[in-house]
């Protein structure tokens, strides 16, 4: 194989790896800001990438697990998006801060109201949630993403043990071991604890959004660098071939 062919193959391979890496990670996911400890409260972010080149995301619907209901769910206001929180009556009331709670959030819906997620962009949707269950290692949220061309993508498939990742996986929140701080917050006075947690959540959520944007920018820069290197390799191979012929 001559120099020009080697350069061409190398450039194409580098670009292909970067493209495939970006595609594999492009699905709705959920991550905590810091840790999501069992029995405590946490700020979680639903990261929604736009996977289409010719349509914008205009709606996200997140359904909450019914086997481990969450009584406290507070969304952060996002400019350009309308937020609807749906609650449902529980078959078995929850005991929260010494009070019986007979309703819990079953769904949160964000609908574009002047805003949207353009192609090649992503948006984070933050929530302050609690009290997290103590008898579970993870929470599965089923999400539905809607585009402005009426296309609907259902991120609802649950991961099976030992199986490959499904095509449209549901967002999964991993829970960490309970800490003394988490139990203390749960046992404290309801109104005081919720207010303090929410104030802290608003501060940390801004940091999470900034971090997500930085990571996304870095990934794009690396992708562009890879493509430039590939093109340079092709050009070098062509020039080398011409010199050799001459």
Image: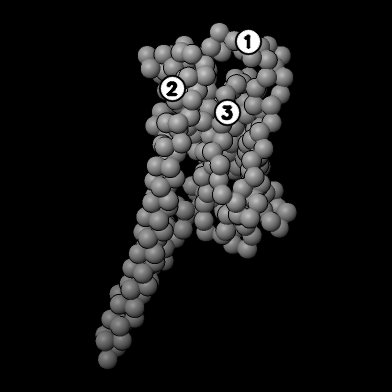
Colouring method of the image: one colour
Residue linked to disc 1: 100
Asked where in the image residue 117 lies, by quadrant, the reply is bottom right
- Residue 141 shows in this picture: yes
Q: Label 1's element?
A: strand
Residue linked to disc 2: 37
Q: CA distance from mark 1 to mark 3?
A: 16 Å
| Residue shown at 45% from the left, 26% from the top | 197
Q: Nearer the viewer, mark 3 or mark 2?
A: 3
Crowd around label 2: few <14 · some 14–19 · many ≥20 (10 Å): many
Q: In the rendering, at what x and y percent does residue 157 appear?
A: 62, 35
Q: Label 3's element?
A: strand
Q: In the rendering, at what x and y percent does residue 104 appear?
A: 65, 22
Using the image as rendered, state which of residue 149 and residue 12 is in the foreground. Answer: 149
Looking at the rendered structure, which numbered label has been put on residue 245? none
Q: In the rendering, at what x and y percent does residue 125 appear?
A: 54, 42
Using the image as rendered, state which of residue 223 and residue 167 is in the foreground. Answer: 223
Asked where in the image residue 243 lies, by quadrant, the reply is bottom left
Q: N-terminal of the two: label 1 or label 3? A: 3
Residue linked to disc 3: 73
Q: CA distance from mark 3 to mark 2?
A: 16 Å
């Amino acid at each position: 194989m001559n120099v020009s062919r080697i350069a061409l193959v190398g450039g194409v391979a580098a670009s292909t790896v970067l493209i495939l890496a970006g595609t594999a990670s492009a699905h709705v996911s959920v991550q905590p800001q810091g840790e999501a400890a069992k029995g405590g409260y946490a700020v979680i972010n639903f990261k929604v990438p736009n996977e289409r080149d010719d349509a914008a995301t205009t709606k996200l619907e997140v359904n909450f697990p019914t086997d481990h209901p969450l009584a406290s769910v507070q969304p952060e206001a996002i400019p350009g998006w309308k937020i609807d929180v749906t609650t449902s009556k529980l078959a078995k009331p929850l005991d929260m801060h010494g009070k019986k709670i007979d309703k819990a959030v079953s769904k949160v819906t964000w609908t574009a109201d002047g805003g949207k997620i353009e192609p090649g962009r992503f948006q984070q949707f933050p929530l302050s949630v609690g009290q997290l269950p103590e008898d579970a290692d993870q929470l599965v949220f089923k999400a539905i993403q809607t585009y402005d061309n009426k296309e609907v993508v259902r991120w609802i498939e649950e991961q099976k043990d030992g199986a490959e990742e499904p095509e449209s996986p549901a967002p999964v929140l991993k829970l960490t071991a309970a800490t003394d701080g988490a139990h203390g917050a749960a046992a404290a006075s309801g109104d005081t604890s919720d207010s303090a947690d929410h104030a802290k959540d608003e501060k940390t959520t801004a940091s999470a959004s900034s971090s997500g944007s930085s990571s996304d920018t870095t990934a794009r820069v690396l992708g562009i660098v890879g493509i430039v290197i590939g093109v340079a390799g092709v050009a070098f191979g062509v020039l080398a071939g011409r010199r050799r012929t001459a």
